Image: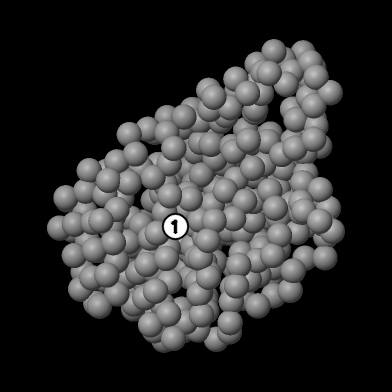
Amino acid sequence: MIPHGFAGIGWSEALRALGMTDIGLELDWAACQTRRAAGHATIQCDVTQYPTAPFKGRTVRKIDSPPCPGFGKSGKKLGLRDLPLVHQAIDDLSRGKDTRAAIGAACLDERSILTAEPMRWHYDLRPEWICMEQVPSVLPVWQQYAEILDSWGYSTAAGVLDAADYGLGQRRPRAVLIASRVREVDLPAPTHGGLGRPPHVAMADVIGWGYTQRPAPTVTSGGTYTGGAEPFGNGTRQAMKRHVGTPLWRDRHGVQHLRPTIAECAALQGFRPGLKFYGRQGQQHLIVGNAVAVPFADAVIRAAAGIGQREEAVAA
């Protein structure tokens, strides 16, 4: 059984390909509808209020990707200022002391406390293995989790990995934590780029336009709290424009702007063709841009579960 907190659809698609299924706990209705339509078990709920009791006494694995906007490169970055409070909440939860309400009220960004939420589940359930993912600035938090889990007898590995090194046609650095109480774990070895490995997958090879010799820049949720129409940031678009008209760029026929469609964003995230995303356009951008890239999720799950590396990694 795999309870999946803050359940987007990237982890779930990777699990299915590996013959595993999760139970997604997610609040947003559009994300829930997207999951259900794709055949993934889903409970629409506030993860912070959902009890761990239904999962006790079972062999449990655990996956979490808490919301990242407060810790990302854009916006006010209030989550970074909240990190001392988040660390305190995690430490408290690891000792069975629930201070989430008081500490959450003191946070500058109400979403910051969500990064401590997985520890409540870890303390109560002691999962067989654990996978967690967030933006790179959250690595110190994952290292704190690792120290606690180490003290409980887990083998852990934490670090920042780039999804492009695992067959994705997009640069997407992410902080990950892998832990297991039944086997030794390490971060997954790259499958692409570097000596003796296939080259990185180029953006143009995935969606037909863009960089011809390197992956796309990071696909975001669109630049606003509710999702937006610019999955590539302004600085990124300016850098892309400097390559237009060169051999390093493939033109987009009949279209002048550099705004990828939702389907193109989904392809760059490694989703299978035809996967339907629900909600308004902004909500769909949120679902796609906030997801864990599928080939990346595959590599992390394999490392946690002790499954051999894919013989041939692909971009979609």
* Residue at horizontal 43 percent and vertical 71 percent from the top: 146
Say what amino acid the circle numbered 1 marks: Leu
The quarter of the picture where residue 188 lies is: bottom right
Horizontally, is 96 left or right of 130 in the view? left
Horizontally, is 209 left or right of 288 in the view? right
* Residue at horizontal 70 percent and vertical 53 percent from the top: 165
Give the residue furthest to the front. 195
**Could you tell me if residue 237 is visible in this image?**
yes
- Asked if residue 212 is positioned above or below residue 36 in the image, the reply reads above
Near-viewer residue (47 or 197): 197
Near-viewer residue (32 or 282): 282
Residue 155 at x, y percent in the picture: 51, 80
Residue 76 at x, y percent in the picture: 32, 34
Residue 56 at x, y percent in the picture: 39, 82
- Asked if residue 50 is positioned above or below residue 228 in the image, the reply reads below
- Asked if residue 36 is positioned above or below residue 19 in the image, the reply reads above
Local packing at callout 1 (Cα closer than 10 Å; few below 14, some 14-19, many 20+) is: some
* Residue at horizontal 28 percent and vertical 61 percent from the top: 87
Secondary structure of the residue carrying tag 1 is: helix
Which residue corresponds to mark 1?
139
